[in-house]
Amino acid sequence: MTMEINSALSAASSGDALQQAVGITLLNKVQDTQAAQAAVMLQDFAAAQHPFLGKSLDIKI
């Protein structure tokens, strides 16, 4: 009986470890994807800016 409990606990804990490892790997992939998308978004935003934007101010009184 004790052997069955130990093997059941061992199987459960190894499943948890695998689940945690998969979760961590998936989280790392999502973070990498978000970082790449942010870099592309910033490049697109910089390319869309007018070259003279912010160089001078138009003030009327």
Image: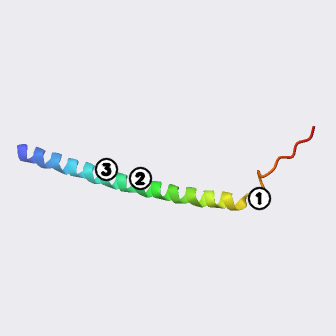
Mark pair 3, 1: CA separation: 47 Å
Give the quarter of the image for residue 38.
bottom right
Q: Residues within 10 Å of mark 1 (few under 14, many from 20)?
A: few
Q: Is residue 15 visible?
A: yes
The residue pinned by badge 1 equals 50
Mark pair 3, 2: CA separation: 10 Å
Left or right: 37 as drawn, with respect to 18: right
Q: Position of residue 51 (x, y in %)?
A: 76, 60
Q: How is the image coloured?
A: rainbow
Q: Position of residue 45 (x, y in %)?
A: 67, 57
Left or right: 27 as drawn, with respect to 9: right
**Residue at left offset 12%, top offset 49%:** 7
Q: Earlier in the sequence, mark 1 or mark 2?
A: 2
The residue pinned by badge 3 equals 20
Judging depth in this view, the residue of 20 and 41 nearest the camera is 41
Marks 3,1: beta carbons within 8 A: no
**Residue at left offset 78%, top offset 57%:** 52
The residue pinned by badge 2 equals 27
Residue found at the far front of this picture? 56
